[in-house]
Image (tube, rainbow, N blue to C red):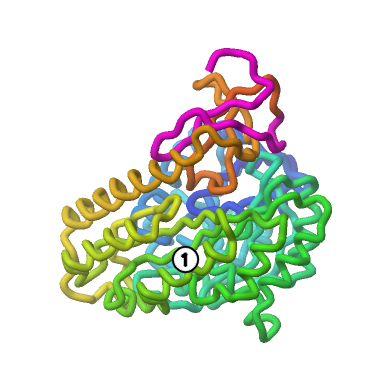
Amino acid sequence: MLSKKLFGVISLGCDKNRVDSEKLLGLIKDRGYALTDDLQKAQIVIVNTCAFLQSAREEAIETILECADYKGGKLEKLVVTGCLPQKFIDELYLPLQEADVFLGINDYEKIFEALEKSYLENERQNYVGKGRDGYIQSRVLTTDEHYAYLKIADGCYNHCTYCLIPKIRGKYRSYPMEELLREAQELGDTAELILVAQDTTRYGEDLYGENRFVSLLQQLSSLDNIRKIRLLYCYPDVITDALIEEIATNPKIVKYMDIPLQHSENRVLKLMNRKGTREGYLALFKKLRERIPGIAIRSTFISGFPTETEEEFEGMLAFIQEAKLINCGFFAYSREPDTGAYRMKPQIHHATKKRRVRALYEAQAEISRQLLSKYIGKEIEVLCDGIDYEKGCFVGRAHFSAPDIDGKVYFYAGEAMQGEFYNVTVDSADHYDLYGHTNDYEGEI
């Protein structure tokens, strides 16, 4: 039934979901099926969904319905996978008649069985929960070849009161170190390996009975094909002295940490079920900067959490000014069903949430502008990501920039290759990006 079918895949949501999609693509490729980026040509389209927020669920439904329009052409089967069916299959199955197959987060290896049955019986198939939580080695990269994400664990047991992840992804599950090392090695020459999980810093606690994040970093650093390692989603309460020392002394680890805080004010943090405090966060930043000179720290914050007062919002604004992080993401609280915060009162009016988020972004823009302006006239190392044809120059990232979530470095050069590092002299800066040139550039700037 499935012989010679052409598959297309759409991945929605975060970089962790991207890795899941890449492994799904790997399974499809291993079975000998062809893949296409042109959905109009695909006979089977898979939408790997996100369900973290209401806005993500709406985007997923819109994307599924848009894909269903291709059924007037070559599209034969529409498959919905990932977080949305995993959590909301009971609400989705009957209304979403456009979908032919549903799979949850651990059901990817069941896709061929589900599709065969759908073709054979000409009926919709619900395979959510029929798979197993196993490690999938196969993978097809969807990033540029010189960098890749390595998902080291799934799930979470922090149980923050605003978050659906534990209800969708389950408890924290570290992947075996030997499997991760094999996967990293099979990526080939990788200029930047980016470690992701809901909480990277807890790696190993569930699997080995002790934290082995530092050990994982050391093992990955020993691989000759990995040139740099970047750390995302480091929870502040698990940033140990041993981890700080490893980042400080290991030349392969980028001096950069993404540390999601979500708020700064102690009362709100407690309501969120976050383990940190304002004072503890500032002390951690001080320690990191003392022990790792030049380290770039970014974070994410939620404003408008239920009961957040104007004073607490002002407190977060003041915290941002004091912390002086290189970059931050700010989000208005999203009221999610089946979370602890859903029934908290009072809920903050959406207009107030929008105003607070806008003010936080404006404050951070000025902080980032000041920090980036210090690089003007200096030479920095930049990983070339390619060419920006609109700007007519090369584009890359410095140590303080992760893909998609941080700013870029636009630079002129006599010659530059994607995936290579270059010394760039910074000529100017704005609140997000830097602009410069290499020493071999002979044109006008």
Q: Is residue 397 left or right of residue 64?
A: right
Residue 201: % across, % down: 58, 71
Farthest right residue in view? 224
Tell how many labels. 1
In which image quadrant can residue 380 be found? top right
Image: 142 above or below 262: above
Q: Nearer the viewer, residue 266 or 164?
A: 266
Name which residue lies at 29% across and 57% down. 332
Is residue 432 on the magenta stretch?
A: yes
Residue 173 can be seen, yes or no: no
Q: What residue is at 43 percent from the left and 77 percent from the top? A: 159
| Residue 3 is covered by the magenta coloring | no
Query: Amino acid type of disc 1?
Result: Phe
Residue occupying the point 80% across, 53% down = 186
> Residue 10 or 205: which is nearer the viewer?
205
Can residue 90 be seen by looking at this rendering? yes
Q: Secondary structure at mark 1?
A: helix
Q: Is residue 224 left or right of residue 104?
A: right
Instruction: Give the image quarter of residue 27.
Output: bottom right
Tell me which residue sits at (69%, 76%) in the image. Answer: 212
Q: Position of residue 335 (x, y in %)?
A: 28, 65
Residue with the mark numbered 1: 285
Q: Indicate the position of residue 378 as horizontal and vertical percent values.
A: 56, 36
Task: Residue 252 in the image: state x and y as whole percent.
Answer: 72, 55
Q: Which residues are magenta?
A: 417-445
In this view, the residue in front, 138 or 437, is: 437
Above or below, 275 relative to 141: below
